[in-house]
Image: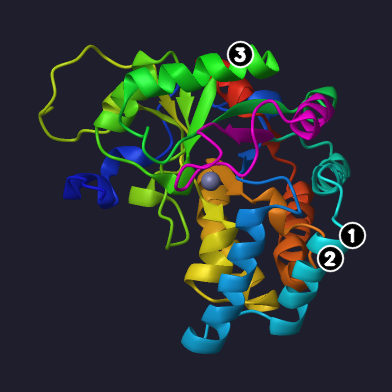
């Protein structure tokens, strides 16, 4: 489904600190930068696809040895049916955790038809979503587009999503991250740029920790090629914010738990800190306040606490674009 030339999978020579006359790469002379982000795939507790996904999770635990806790998963299904969690709660929790350190983050809203395969399990017209967006904006955080699974290389469909966010939520999305990190080089970036986005936060491995291709700094999408370009287009203005660690990679792909997950995440983050680069984290809202996923939230809190102690500059995607240009 994805095809990338091998060159972009390998650590490269021009991925290190950009050469500047000025030593001050980040605002306030911070030693490194931090980009916190959340992909909003679902917001409702009592929702058909979510309940089916939980039951499927239980089935996989029984039949395929997937990590998890059957009793807690079933209890969540019961909660969804009889006493659903308010949609705002997980967002309040995320904002509260980040506010402890004065951090602000970026939330990517998924746009696709509700019933579509791999679609969002909410609509842009949902009153709960509107309340959540207002809460996010009031906290000084950013709202971007979470690009639909089948839109990942389609400029016209990206434009449609951008317009939908404008019309339904009054959001002018500057940045984008594709659902499930769907990415095709160079089509994804060309399509995103054509649709008017200024940055992409998709570039990362879904099943591996650490920056893809060793990329620790933002870079323009047109500087991806280290060989003569195979495509004929003008130099890009689309800034790529490479991903460092995603929650699902730690806990699902690698099957880690608790302290092990924290150690692995910190191991992936440390080289980026040492290089003075951009540490970029992706944690999904629907794993907060969940007894079964307690360590997902715990690791996020621990990482933020450790990072804060090192005094990074934390910016939303939009602010990183301004700072970088
Ligand atoms: Zn997603």
Give the magenta-colored segment's residue range. 106-135
Q: Is residue 35 left or right of residue 292?
A: left
Is residue 141 in view from this perspective?
Answer: yes
> Toward which corner of the image does residue 126 lie, by quadrant?
top right
197 vs 29, nearest the viewer: 197
* Helix, strand or loop at mark 3: helix
Q: Earlier in the sequence, mark 3 or mark 1?
A: 1
* Helix, strand or loop at mark 2: helix
Q: Is residue 90 left or right of residue 281?
A: right
User: Is 314 placed above or below 251 here?
Assistant: above
**Residue 24 magenta-highlighted:** no
Labelled disc at residue 166: 3
| Neighbours of disc 2 within 10 Å: few (<14), some (14-19), many (20+) | some
Task: Name the residue rendered at 75%, 68% in the picture.
Answer: 77
| Neighbours of disc 3 within 10 Å: few (<14), some (14-19), many (20+) | few
Task: Name the residue rendered at 36%, 34% in the picture.
Answer: 152
**Residue 127 magenta-highlighted:** yes
How many marks overall? Answer: 3
Labelled disc at residue 256: none
Q: Which residue is mark 1?
A: 83
Q: Which residue is mark 2?
A: 79
Give the image location of residue 316, x and y in percent. Answer: 66, 29
Is residue 324 in view from this perspective?
Answer: no
Cα separation, mark 2 vs mark 3, equals: 34 Å
Q: Is residue 279 left or right of residue 259?
A: left
Give the image location of residue 213, x and y in percent. Answer: 33, 49
* Helix, strand or loop at mark 1: loop
Q: Is mark 3 within 8 Å of ligand 1?
A: no
Task: Check whether the beta carbons of the residues at disc 2 and disc 1 lie within 8 A of each other.
Answer: yes
234 vs 313, nearest the viewer: 234
Q: Earlier in the sequence, mark 2 or mark 3?
A: 2
Task: Check whether the beta carbons of the residues at disc 2 and disc 3 lie within 8 A of each other.
Answer: no
């Amino acid at each position: 489904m994805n095809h990338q030339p091998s060159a972009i999978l390998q650590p490269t020579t021009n991925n290190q600190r950009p050469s500047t006359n000025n030593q001050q790469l980040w605002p306030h002379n911070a030693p490194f930068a931090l980009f916190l982000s959340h992909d909003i795939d679902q917001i409702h507790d009592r929702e058909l696809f979510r309940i089916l996904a939980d039951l499927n999770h239980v089935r996989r635990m029984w039949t395929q040895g997937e990590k998890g806790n059957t009793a807690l998963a079933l209890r969540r299904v019961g909660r969804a049916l009889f006493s659903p969690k308010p949609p705002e709660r997980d967002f309040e929790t995320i904002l509260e955790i980040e506010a402890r350190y004065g951090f602000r983050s970026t939330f990517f809203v998924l746009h696709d038809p509700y019933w579509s395969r791999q679609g969002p399990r909410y609509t842009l017209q949902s009153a709960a979503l509107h309340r959540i967006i207002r809460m996010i904006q009031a906290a000084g955080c950013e709202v971007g587009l979470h690009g639909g699974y089948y839109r990942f290389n389609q400029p016209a469909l990206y434009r449609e999503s951008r317009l939908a966010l404008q019309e339904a939520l009054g959001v002018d999305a500057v940045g984008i991250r594709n659902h499930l990190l769907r990415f095709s080089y160079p089509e994804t970036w060309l399509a995103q740029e054509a649709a008017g986005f200024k940055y992409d936060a998709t570039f990362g491995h879904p099943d591996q920790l650490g920056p893809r291709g060793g990329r620790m700094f933002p870079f323009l999408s047109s500087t991806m090629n280290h060989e003569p370009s195979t495509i004929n287009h003008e130099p890009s203005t689309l800034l790529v914010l490479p991903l460092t660690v995603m929650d699902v990679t730690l806990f699902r792909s690698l099957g880690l738990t608790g302290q092990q997950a924290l150690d692995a995440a910190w191991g992936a983050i440390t080289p980026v800190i040492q290089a003075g680069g951009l540490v970029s984290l992706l944690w999904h809202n629907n794993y907060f306040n969940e007894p079964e996923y307690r360590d997902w939230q715990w690791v996020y809190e621990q990482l933020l606490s450790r990072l804060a102690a090192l005094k990074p500059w934390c910016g939303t995607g939009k602010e990183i674009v301004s700072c970088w240009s």
